[in-house]
Amino acid sequence: MRSPLLQLLMFLLLSLTGTAAGDLVFHLPTDNKSLYDKGGDSYFMYVDRTFEGKTTKPWEGGTWGLVRNPFRASNGNVYYSRMHEGIDVKPILRDENNEPLDDVRPIAHGQVAYTSEDPRKSNYGRYIVIAHKIKEGTVYSLYAHMASVTCQVGQRVSPQDTIGRLGYSGVGLNKTRAHCHLELCLMINADYDLIDQPPSNKHGVFNGQNLIGINVADVLRACKNGKPFSLSRYFSRQKEHYRVRVPCIGIMDFLKRYPFLYKGRRDRRPTSLEIAFTKEGVPIAIYSSKEKVDAPILVKCTPMPFLQQNCTVNRVKGSSQDATLTASGMRYVNNFLWLEGRYPVPATQPDTSSTPQ
């Protein structure tokens, strides 16, 4: 089996002959088309949930966002603290032994960037990553829990091709809950394999920790009638939840990949940068700032009726009045800042913040 580094080198070499970026229409990954009409439990695989003594199988747990680990806040309402970065697509074909038979296809034209065929190496089980060049940069689709993988790194693929079969490989799944976990992601840093090295990192830059999932169901619905997807238009409609000011020590690899996110002047180097995040941790804009900082610092946070760690994937902690970055949040932001083989500030110690509250 090829190493993640060798797979990356092969992908980059083959990418040199790639076509120019342009408009892309994204398609459904399987023959399950109910996302376009019924949706709900016809499309999304449920999760098994026990909350306040009641056992349920909510399909909402198979959608994108903060949809898992329910808790009841002091105002009496139920919220969710655990992030699900993709969507779980139900199979529609099974054999007499209840094994799923659905083929999985790329959601757009692209190039296979990575495959992990050993289900023991990740909670994703067997998974595939495909790179798609669009006007605003390169985005990556990820297909997890595969029963089989039938594509190779460097292979050019289209929505008509089969890349494997839907399955239930990975931790915590069984035949009944077989599904295709689908993500559409941004890559944080092309040097992530230097930040997080083996043996803890078995997948190089295609480690899930280096890929930021956006709501791929929104993307698929937006392209239903053949309209190309615009990442910049999509991000312009997202709501900022918190903002982090960081030292500017050079051009982030992330900004090189997605330059449309930068909202400052391009003819001068800012003193610092401010990254605007959604509550799910998606960076939707980067602003210039004249304020000097030596380390990442939270400068803005939307008030919530409970502690911030319960709605920010544990990256911000405290109340709305005294919110700060958690150690996990600091590590997350630092991954954007890793430049020339170093962080701009020392790594922090593990965080002890509890979630949920």
Image (spheres, rainbow, N blue to C red):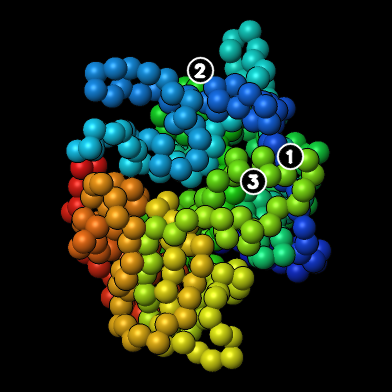
Q: Amino acid at mark 2?
A: Thr
Secondary element type, mark 3: helix
The percent position of residue 12, horizontal first and vertical second, equals 68, 65
Secondary element type, mark 2: loop
Q: Amino acid at mark 1?
A: Lys
The number of discs equals 3
Q: Quadrant of the C terminus?
A: top left
Residue wearing tag 3: 219
Q: Amino acid at mark 3?
A: Val
Q: Is residue 152 above or below residue 342?
A: above
Residue drawn at (45%, 43%) of the image: 65
Real-space Cα distance between discs 3 and 1? Answer: 9 Å
* Camera-nearest residue between 208 and 43: 43
Which quadrant would residue 257 be assigned to in this image? bottom right
Residue wearing tag 2: 176
Looking at the image, residue 99 sits to the left or right of residue 278; the answer is: right
* Camera-nearest residue between 284 and 199: 284
* Marks 1 and 2 close (CB-CB < 8 Å): no
Crowding around mark 1 (Cα neighbors within 10 Å: few <14, some 14 to 19, many 20+) is: some
Label ID, residue 224: 1
The percent position of residue 321, horizontal first and vertical second, equals 21, 61
Q: Is residue 22 above or below residue 64?
A: below
Which quadrant would residue 42 be assigned to in this image? top right
Q: Earlier in the sequence, mark 1 or mark 2?
A: 2
Residue 3 visible to an observer of this rendering = no
Residue 265 visible to an observer of this rendering = yes
Residue drawn at (75%, 69%) of the image: 16
* Marks 3 and 2 close (CB-CB < 8 Å): no
